[in-house]
Image (tube, rainbow, N blue to C red):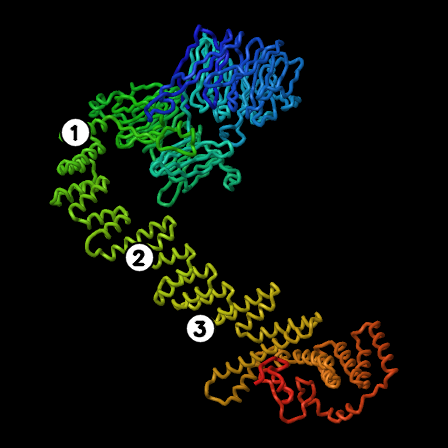
Amino acid sequence: MFIYLSKKIAIPNNIHLKCVSWNKDQGFIACGGDDGLLRVLKLETQTDDSKLKGLAAPSNLSMNQTLDGHSGAVQVVTWNEQYEKLTTSDQNGLIIVWMLYKGAWYEEMINNRNKSVVRSMSWNADGQKICIVYEDGAVIVGSVDGNRIWGKELKGNQLAHVAWSPDSKILLFGMANGEVQIYDNQGNFIMKMAISCLANATGAVSIAGIHWYAGAGGYVERDCPCLAICFDNGRCQIMRYENDEYPVCIDTMMNVVSIQWNHCGSVLAVAGCLRASNVEKEVNVVQFYTPFGEHLRTLKVHGKQMTGVSWEGGGLRIALAVDSYIYFANIRPDYKWGYCCSTVVYAYTKPERQEYCVVFWDTKNNEKFVKYVKSLMSITTSGDFCILASKADDTQPQVQTLLYMYVLILCNSIGTPLDSKYIDIDPLFVTMTKTHVIAASKEAFYLWQYRVAKKLTALEINQVTRTKKEGRESKTLTSGTIHRYSLPNVVLIQKYTLNNRAYYMSLNCNSSRLAIIDITGVLTLLDMDVRAATDSGNQQSAGDPSKFERKDVWDMKWANDNPDLFAMMEKTRMYVFRNLDPEEPIQTSGYICNFEDLEIKSVLLDEIMKDPERPNKDNLINFEIRSLRDSRALIEKVGIEDASQFIEDNPHPRLWRLLAEAALQKLDLKTAEQAFVRCKDYQGIEFVKRLGNLQSEPMKQAEVAAYFSRFEEAERMYLDMDRRDLAISLRIKLGDWFRVLQLLKTGSGDCDDTLLQQAYNAIGDYFADRQKWVNAVQYYLQGHNQERLAECYYMLEDYDGLERLTSVLPENHKLLPDIGQMFATVGMCEQAVNAYLKCNQPKAAVDTCVHLNQWNKAVELARTHNMKEIKSLLSKYASHLLEKNKTLEAVELYRKAHHFLDAAKLMFKIADEEAKKRTKPLRVKKLYVLAACLVESYHEQVKTSQQSKAKGKKSEATFALAGLLEEDASSSDNRIVDNAWRGAEAYHFFLLAQRQLYEGYMEKAMRTGLHLREYEDIIPAVEIYSLLAICAAANRAFGTCSQAFIKLESLDSLEPEQRQLYEDLALEIFTKHTPKDTRMMERDGSSEGMEEKLPTCIVTGLPIQEYQFWMCSLCKHCALEQEISRYNCCPLCHTPVA
């Protein structure tokens, strides 16, 4: 940072000031002094020139009001910014609160304890409470509206200072004897503060100031020290919090009267006078320190006694009370900033975030890119790149293992990191060129050659170094010595000695001269090359650099294209020097970004930092230097001949270009060509030649207008010449397709179809780029651009449009797979399959079906196109379904895939489980029927596959045999294949017997019950014999009934209690009835031997004894013809009766 005195305001009648306070929000300055003096001033900038902003603009007093009310010397003034109140107190203990009303200050409240004098007053961070401390130990905390919250007497203590913590939970009281005590916000004592900065100090000390920065402007870094306590003997400690055991301690070597933090807690101002034993007169100074105790600058101020210091709200000015004057000093902060590739890079802190917010502001397009960097140390730029130096993040493995504490990040102009280097030296000073980055600590420097092919190398040299800038050589400086090295081999060539400590150094473009600004703001030049004797004439004409000196310089920049040209900032003026000869200064307070082509680009960082989230192009200013302004004036007012002579005497490519453009405007092609040659503009020379070949004057003028980007004018000229084709080609070059379309349509006669189509598509692209898909579709339709149409339909979710497009496209069109993919992503299986099949990609179609769980479709397609891999897919999916317990879905899957046997196995498993659960018998029968039908389908499948294998060679019987043999070989589970219908039969007869019983056909019911005995493996024996016993009893066939009971009583599966119940029931029945069957049963008994072989009728449950009977085509079960005639479907499998 750099600081210089800028203004001085005298207080009338030589009344000495005691205190000064600057309102951070509204900008009012209050100063108090002897004899009840209290004034409120306000400095405001008044200027009509929009370029004059910030410190460069003249400032005048817009308010200068004397506030009457105090009789004694005003000792304490403090602002409440939130509520626009001023609180003041004098030596008699009188406190007055002032308020602003219609632009003037008036008394609002008055308070006087009449016992003691107020030593200090402090408002808390939100302006709600004020704490007032009196010399006799009394403390009062009041609210903003004047009510007393609490009061307390600290007996035996003389109070001198008070400060609130940022969160208003803690109060610090400074005692007259130098102690600091910590209390809570209700006035309860917590502890005494440890004061470590007074170690080895002798004599009595008193506190000069306590200031606890409240964090309103963010913090410089995490855990940044923010509580400063300073003593009158110059010792100072800066703490992170009130009981910080390791504070930053400073000895300022001065007698301190007042301290204050700036607006963002990055600089502490310490005001007082220097203690010097050999000087009779003490010197008033303000010292500036960082929160970590590093000394930044010293400002000397004339006068006898300095009494107060206060920062302006933006941190760009500081007010000092000295004797009966207020001095103002301007501050040029060391912003973290840089300029690369027309992008301004700057960093600032936000209250709500711990990191630095780094903004990459592209000044051409007015776009900004933001990135957050922890513990940022500096920003350095060169060419198109930028280096961010910061402390390394502890979480990174490089930091934990190799103890690399710092990192250099190489970024491009939009903040994208391209590379980084972890280093173990503190990069206090960083510079870069187009190939190298050099970082220096106080002891060593580190060279990193970036962007060399694709290999990045690093090289480190241990050398006592201080700071440097780099051209073809790099310089480093320690204790006033400059070292000069050659690159890339880093060899020390030369040493130079300086008389003072350098603050900033810069080499000119050919490394012949070094500019040095020292710590006091003096700019000097150092010649690097000892010039040969032949150059002595030029040496004198150029002035002697060793004699050159300018004071109060805080920024400078060499021109990129001229070693004798540089610009520098001196206070609020910019000077341009050519051969050490200054031009007239320009009023500005901007930081110089770039000096090239006789133009200086400057950025008003002070204005940008007021609202860093919204940088404004008004804060970027271009200045033309005198030779450019003069040449322009000569061309405009005198003529090309004289101007050309002037430029010959002061040659520069920029001036030649100016001349060439002026000559072009006047169609003076000879001069234009010469000027283009002088500024080495090959395109310009070509353009002049092309103009020379044109015959017509208007055509030349039109071309020149286009060259100078006056396109409307050029187009009008072309159209006037009836050269619509040239107007169209001009617009095509500019990419203005809307105008192209307009010109194509307005012309008479037919326009070029391909060009029209191109225009439609280009406009479609324009809308598509801006995601205006509806508009894009209209133009793509007219331009027959099917690929982009498909994309637009997809974006618009217009799937009907996509389907229409699919039907229009020819087969095997390259767009069809993409359309298929589009349909697949939104789950439209059928449309996707159609698209894939149309471009002959059945594999993709099957994959889509599988992906969308349309297995039946997948299987169908796989079978249609004879694809082999369907089996593995099926088993994968089936196992997935079974895992989720979706057995029926798996059956359906296998059935649709024609894997009937697998489906049947699962189906039998379900039926068996349902039977065990004692579900309704009808449901169980249906499940068994379905399983058996699947087995029948399997038989059919095997048979047909055999037939297709050997077409027309053998008889059908042979096929059937072959099919059966194949089945036998393939089927592992014979029970399922051979006895597919057993389960269905069992439950069919079980249901039939009960139906017959309820309908009163007792005989038939009993016969069916007897037949059921064959199915004990499927239906529990208890149920079969219970049913048989009931049917037999109902049929009065007690012999059969008795046999059923005997069977029931002998079952092992019964519990003893159940068996007992059966025995009791049997006893009850057979005591009444003899266990013998009636005559009818006996008559039928003769045929029992044959009954085994006779088929059973599935309608009646009786054995069929006739030779002619009906057989079902599916389940192959039989029935009596007269019985089945009453049915439409087979009673067992429900196949329609033929």
SS state under label 3: loop
Distance (Cα) linking label 1 and label 2: 55 Å
> Which class describes the residues within 10 Å of circle 2: few (<14), some (14-19), or many (20+)?
some
Q: Residue at x 45, y 61 (%)?
A: 824
Left or right side of 658 for 793: right
Q: Nearer the viewer, residue 1009 or 281?
A: 1009
Q: Nearer the viewer, residue 731 or 272?
A: 731
Q: Residue at x 48, y 61 (%)?
A: 827
Question: Which one is in front in this view, the residue at disc 3 or the one at disc 2?
Answer: 2
- Figure quadrant of the N terminus: top left
> Which class describes the residues within 10 Å of circle 3: few (<14), some (14-19), or many (20+)?
few
User: Toward which corner of the image does residue 59 lie, by quadrant?
Assistant: top left
Q: Residue furthest left?
A: 695
- Figure quadrant of the C terminus: bottom right
Q: Which residue is mark 1?
A: 643
Percent x, y for residue 223? 54, 30
